[in-house]
Image (tube, helix red, strand yellow):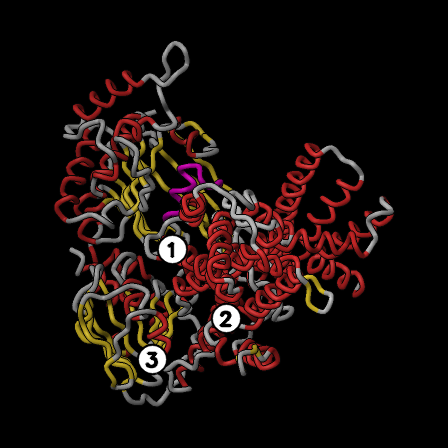
Amino acid sequence: MENVSRLKLINIEKSFPGVKALSNVNFNADKGTVHVLCGENGAGKSTLMKIINGIYQPDGGQIFINGQEVKVQNPIAARKLGISMIFQELNYIPEMTIEESLFVGNWPRNAVGNVDWSEIRKRTLELLKKENLNYSPETKLKELTVSDIQMLEILKAVSYDSDIIIMDEPTSSITNKEVEVLFDKINALRSRGKSIIYISHKMDEIFKIADRITVFRDGVVVDSRPKDEYDMETVIAQMVGRRLENNFPKQEVAIGSKVLEVKALSGEAFSDISFHLRQGEIIGFSGLMGAGRTEIMRALFGLDQYRSGEIYINGEKAAIKNVKSSIQRKMVMLSEDRRRFGIIPVRSVRENVSLTSIKKFINGGRLHAKKEIDTVNEYCKRMNVKTPSIETSIEALSGGNQQKVILAKWMVTDPDVLILDEPTRGIDVGAKYEIYKLVTELASQKKGIIMVSSELPELIGMCDRIYVVAKGRIVGELNRNEFSQENIMRYATEAVS
Amino acid sequence: MDIKKLWSEIKSKYSIFLVLAVLFVVSWIANENFMSVKNLSNISIQITVATILAFGQTILIICGMLDLSSASVLALAGVLSVSTYISTESLLLAFLVAIAASVACNIINGLMITKFKAPPFIATLAMMTMARGAALLYTNGQNIYQIGRYVKFGQGSILGVPTPIIFMLGTLVVTWYILKHTVLGRSVYAIGGNEEAANASGIDVNKVKMKAFIINGIFVGIAGVIFMSRVNGGMPNGAVGYEFKALTAAVIGGTSFTGGIGTSLGTLAGSFIVGFLDNIMVLSGVNSYLQQIVRGAIIALAVIYDIFAKTKRTKAKLGNIEAKNKV
């Protein structure tokens, strides 16, 4: 029985309504190794990890731990099987102390059945000492940095005596120096025989830490080799792949004068952002998650404040203080998070559409109902919204139709600049195509369009120019003849190192 | 098929009025004294103060807030108004003082919520205690009697219609108009439905919340004048618990505490439902402690119905999606 993998996944299958998330996935994690999983956003990495951690159940396939077939029912079962996961978005309770958080849900009990706090203190001190961490057990989590909390998560995994530790993009929100500390820790765990599964798409990191690399794309394993048999170019090429070019309804549109010019815009999460947009042009903003794309757009639209810089709309300097001033300047934004920033769920399609321009329908202090209904009907028709009636509550519509309603809401304001942040996120393929068609049509009406997207094919298929953002800065500008997924990814990942 | 659809639409949109109608008929049959002009007019007058407060609450609850201080502010505005009348003998001035005092308290409520981000529950709880204290401090805990012509506000009538009912109908029309026909109304619904989305649509959320409190302030002031006038005095300890009567009427009337849903007519119906129930229980000699239990049970029922209706909506939505996926 030599060389039994600690974790072995065979032919894992998983579908979500309308999407095949994983098909025929095989994956191993061996003792004392770091196995890096890489792939673009939405390639299926997180889904696979959630299956290993018991958050999702696979539709098919087998999971073996130390040669034994297991079913991972839920995260608690996973923990018992020796699997711990450190999530990309750390969820923690700021008011908890270190010792409380280490033992939450797993409290040692005393004879009477109450929580044994002295035991907790003892074990916390032991753990901290063993792992060489210099914290007091009574420190509250809110006083710690993100990397400290990450360390604690690792500590927690160790305290459960987990043999398999999954880390989902652990360096996405920590500094370079903290990355060093993290890597030291990972090396220590490796030498103690733990199996680490490390998800990342930052090339420099991957090659620094990996023993083995597996590349994911569109829910399948493209390739899996020991690190020494890989180089950066190959990994990038495999990540982006040579997919069938989707049919994008891109049209050549006469490019007009500048509608938007941004000069040296700086804010919390970005600095020195300069770019321009012309009438009829579609420009793309690409970058890895957390690069600052959304933050730039939020500041531009007045949802957040920017610190310095200048914005010119149609050649005039515009002081964007809030959303209202942005709308007045004829710049609007479709948010990436439709449920949070887009729809008013309990209200009707009509009210959602007319939300931005209700003033237009008020005549002598009274709402002109027919005018409102006619306008809403007209825009719903133009945006091809499929709804039983405009009085239907918006939450009864599909994601794609909700998105079209939000687009209609903005079109009523007759904007010159449209910022579309992940306009096709979470909607099905058919509706995506419709959105692309609408965007093309809007461009042909001389609107300037900014498209932020994590889907490279979408940007390549739709845009006239693409700006690449990394670490809150624009690190590259590509014209149509330079477009390729490799080029974009190279800018996005190289700048990170 | 179409009739079925129509019926379900009537049921979902007008269910509260059906309940009111059924309750009316049942009361009529159950007790011979119920159906008389005098009794019905009494009920209407009795519910005016709570109903006017409830209209203010309706706007606030739709907007995702509430006002626990309304009854205390009512008392403060009421006693200030009564004493103004006694020293100036001007009904108009007395009326304006009530409105001004109440609006001032509500501006403070609004500022606590918009500027200092206090949860409405806590902010108005603080105001509830402060305003009651202020009313007691101002009157030294004593009732003010001999209010002369001040009684006209609550006990007079115009063209045979009792003044409180005129005030109630007036505030109803104002509430209805605001919610149905103004930018403010739409903004109130949008903020209660999804505050972040409302903000991202260019609505000045804080301004709308302030306006909602100012309108509530005007209503509470009016209610204060009517209340003091009806009890023939300035009573700093008056109207205790009326904020909950008002909340009850709004909730029974279909205003959703999760925000974004509610109507003025629904609240009026809710208020009448409580009024009819109280009346029929009194007429039938139901034990007064039992009456309280019934009142509480009605609130529980209304809330359960609200949640039930919501899950049904979500289920219908899921059904739609499944149907779509099949196609």
Give the foreground label among 2 and 1.
1
The x and y percentages for residue A163 are 30, 29
Work out whether residue A235 or residue A398 is closer to the camera in this orientation and state it.
A398
Q: Please, what secondary structure does the residue beneath circle 2 have? A: helix
Residue in view at x 17 percent, y 40 percent: A183
Is residue A250 rendered to the left or right of residue B183?
left
Label 3: which residue? A329
Q: Are marks 2 and 1 on the same chain?
A: no
Label 1: which residue? B108
Give the foreground label among 1 and 3.
1
Q: Please, what secondary structure does the residue beneath circle 1 have? A: helix
Is residue B226 rendered to the left or right of residue A332?
right
Specify whether residue B322 is in view. Answer: no
Q: Which residues are magenta?
A: A45-57
Give the foreground label among 3 and 2.
3
The disc placed on residue A404 is 2
Estimate how packed mark 2 is, as few (under 14), some (14 to 19) or many (20 or more) residues with alpha carbons within 10 Å.
many
Mark count: 3
Which part of the image, by quadrant, shows the C terminus of chain A?
bottom left
